[in-house]
Image (cartoon, rainbow, N blue to C red):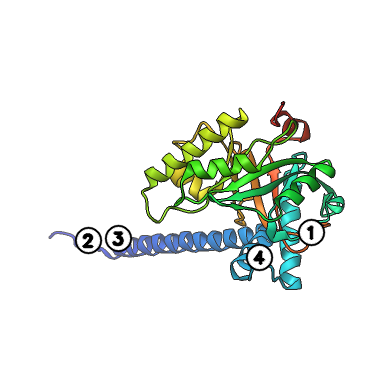
Amino acid sequence: MRKKVSTRKHSYNRTTTRKTKRSKSNLFWWFLVVCFFGLILYLGYHYRGGLAYYLGLKSNKINSQTAEEKRISDIRNVQVLEKSNGKSVGIDVSEYQGKISWSYVDTLEQQYPIQFVFIRATVGKDRKDRKFDQNWAGAKKNKMIRGAYHYYRPNENSIEQARLFIKTVNLQKGDLPPVVDLEKLAKNQSIQNLKLGLRRWLQAVEAHYQVKPIIYTGERYYDDFLKEEFSDYLFWIANYNFYREEMKDNWLFWQFTEKATVPGIKGNVDVNIYNGDLQQLQHITLEE
């Protein structure tokens, strides 16, 4: 008579094994969830100043900050400046800053010397910044390294825009190279024609001043449209995002905020960091 073999033990072992696997799987997923929320909390704490600044920037009306928003933006500005210690710091201005008392424009956050300034000179093919002459002379008198920029309108003739800038701006020894400010896409032409016009402006201005201009634009605009075809030019990049704490190596200048307070200027001011110290900044200025 064949002996009957019991399967209870094997069934019990299989059930126990399945339960053990499920238990380990559950623990693994709980571990992932805890790690995920832990990462969120860490990033939230690490970027607390910048995140608050960024959210405030999105919801804030132009030139109207509450005391709390002002405090948060100042904290973020200081954090960026601390991480950029040793690099040259400057500002950029236009008629929107009104009348500037240049003799008071000296430091940022009471400890970072303002060593250079970019001043808007012209807009499109037919408009001169209403405060350019005063600002250009004021910066010189205040012994600041100065540079002039043109706000480029993609829908207007590029050569006429270059001529207006050349007619308006007399660069001298010690001034920074000319800058073209490109922020918008064209409404009535292709991106390729926009790039063609920009190239013509750059070439006309370079031929006159005998120095390659600098291109100012936003980081996304740079990545999407200019990075490849204009790699032979140096860039001044605007990026106010909270996660951006330091400038990239291939940026010449970084505009990291438009909400700073500077002595001698009413309202908000853009602040920029040069990717080098003062001596290196002086090295890129015009020689003649």
Which of label 2 and label 4 is nearer to you?
A: 4
Of the two numbered discs 1 and 4 on the same chain, state the one appearing first in sequence. 4
Q: Which residue is mark 4?
A: 52
- The quarter of the displayed image where residue 48 is located: bottom right
Q: Which residue is mark 1?
A: 265
Give the left or right position of residue 129, taking residue 195 as reference.
right
Question: Can you tell which mark lies on residue 5?
Answer: 2
- The quarter of the displayed image where residue 285 is located: top right
Can you give x and y, in whole percent of width and height, for residue 173 in the image? 74, 30
Viewer-proximal residue among 48 and 203 = 203
The residue type indicated by label 4 comes to: Ala
Of the two numbered discs 1 and 3 on the same chain, state the one appearing first in sequence. 3
Who's the residue at 32% across and 61% down the image? 14
Of the two numbered discs 2 and 4 on the same chain, state the one appearing first in sequence. 2
Of the two numbered discs 2 and 3 on the same chain, state the one appearing first in sequence. 2
**Cα separation between marks 1 and 3:** 84 Å
Question: Can you tell which mark lies on residue 10?
Answer: 3
The 10 Å Cα crowd at callout 1, few under 14, some 14 to 19, many 20 or more, is some
Q: Report if residue 217 is visible in the image.
A: yes
The residue type indicated by label 1 comes to: Ile
**Cα separation between marks 4 and 3:** 60 Å
